[in-house]
Amino acid sequence: MDMITIAMNIAKNIEKGVKPLIGWEKGTEIVKIGADGTPTKRIDLIAEDIAINSIEKQCSAILISEEIGHKQIGDNPKYVIVLDPIDGTYNALNDIPIYSVSIAICKLNDRNIDELTINDLEVGVVRNISTGEVYFAKKGSGAFVFKNNIQKRIYTSKITNLSDASVGVFAYGLTTNTLDFIKDRRVKRIRIFGSAALELCFVARGSLDAFINVNETTRLCDIAGGFVVLKEAGGIISDRDGRIINMPLNINAKNSFICSNDKLHKKFVSIFGNKWKLKPTKFGIVSRADKKEAIELVYEIINYLDSKNIDYELEQDIYNKIYNTNNNNIENKDKYLMKDVSEISHMISIGGDGTVLRTSRIVEGNEIPIITVNKGTVGFLAEFDVEGIFDIIEDIINGDYEIEKRTKCSGHIKYKDNNQKTLPSALNELVITTKSPAKMIQFEVYVNGNFVEEIRADGLIISTPTGSTAYSLSAGGPIVEPQVDGFVIVPICPFKLFSRPIVVNGSSEIKIKIIKKETLVAVDGTIEGELKKGDEIILRKSDSYTYFVKGRNFYETLRKLSVIDGGAR
């Protein structure tokens, strides 16, 4: 008898035995503490007994189950069976039609069970007990759903944007990180079903785009069956830091997990974990190409990466300066030209703040940390001096470094004829300024649909926390720590002295409506459009962040650049 048949029979027998018990009052009684340390309800124990009887009639095996722990069934066990007899017990007892039996199997092949991990499982079956719908997969053969006597192959979704994604969240012990994710409305919808095995299968068939639990509370039996199905459907499953899950086949094994399609997976890891604990695969280099010292540093970094056998690619301008000007005879030099930024794991930015802003635009939408090296005039965004660059590259190679996540502002222009133009995300600020020198513009400011004030001024700055020490500071705005979840609205030379800077919550929607005069819109110093009377700009927090490899302390930077007093303590 093959493993798929064994698993299907067990699942069918459990469904047959459990269905009459749905809504049974005594089914909720706690009869003992299971082997996994959680309470066992009567209905769980009945389902497990049915499974044991079913296995005894079909094969010899080592059973791993939440209630009984590890149990050998028969002599000379041939298989290992990982079972969750009812995944979603609360749903079952309250007749909520999302509960399942989850089974995963592999051959023992004379191996010690202590040597096996979840990745050795060969077959997964998850049966929705309330509907009879069955998900199943065999390693190397694809994943399928069987419903109404029709078998259909399933695949994960092709959604690539967080804003379009539907996400399942593990319901217990929601972290602050997860609650902030929900509050910020980063995705289209959040779903909490309460049956991990089924939710993994929903991701496998594309009904959900991701399923996450960032706590170390996911148990082997919770996900084993769905794990096999999702992998065969093309899903990516890792812990919250992006490391491939390799749980031992042990009742006490627990882990965090993030599962999704390959396009969304990196985005979720960047939100909930630290994927950069993994070894860098390829550095990208962006640099000023008009400064001799910056070009010389690029040469030094290239030689250093070569000595470490780490690949690199160069942004077009610095590539032209290095490989087209001085090295025309190098073979296959095109391999050093940056073509697909998504293949880059870490980016090095050499220059001033302008170079950092340009680098941020290059990596837009990709979770690529930037190592900023000051070779510019001000260097407010530069975390490292030239002397420290090789030490931090070595730290990155060894995984010994921190990432700082910076909020960006995004939005669009809504013209009075209802046409729209999407604006690039701003790392520093978006500026609305007069088109004619010495001419004030007039506009209205709204926050979350609430009218704030009408302002006459030379312009308006909407600054991120990162940009609070840039143009916003010069215009009288406050200094804001980079980690603060908010934006600063700063009038530029307002006509009324009581028009003051306002700090708003990071989840706010900001609307600026032009009342008089033509204006220009600049994002991080680049002109992006013109506005006329009646046009509006709608802004809110960007779906993506800019990530920096953390260097000097924020207040150290302020003192170094004399923004705050750097005198003796």
Image: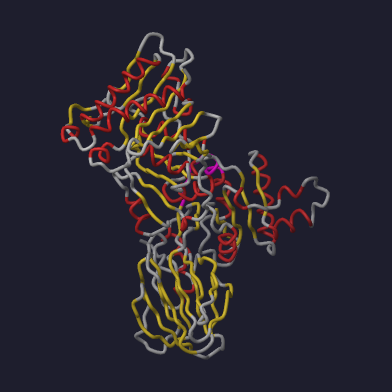
Q: How is the image coloured?
A: secondary structure
Residue 54, placed above or below residue 40: above
Quarter occupied by residue 213: top left
Q: Position of residue 545 (x, y in %)?
A: 48, 58
Q: Position of residue 17 (x, y in %)?
A: 28, 27
Quarter of the figure with the C terminus:
bottom left
Q: Position of residue 404 (x, y in %)?
A: 45, 54
Residue 277 left/right relative to 100: right
Q: Nearer the viewer, residue 208 or 246?
A: 208
Q: Total label count?
A: 0
Residue drawn at x 25%, y 41% as measured from the top left: 95
Q: Nearer the viewer, residue 293 or 372?
A: 372
Residue drawn at x 59%, y 63% as measured from the top left: 358
Q: Position of residue 264 (x, y in %)?
A: 50, 49
Which span is picked out in magenta? 394-403
Residue 400 in magenta stretch: yes
Q: Nearer the viewer, residue 218 or 381?
A: 218
Residue 240 left/right relative to 261: left
Residue 436, placed above or below residue 544: below
Residue 556 in magenta stretch: no
Q: In the image as oriented, which residue stretches furthest toward the front? A: 149
Residue 411 left/right relative to 25: right
Residue 320, placed above or below residue 234: below
Residue 238 left/right relative to 89: right
Q: Nearer the viewer, residue 230 or 393?
A: 230
Q: In the image as oriented, which residue stretches furthest toward the right? A: 329
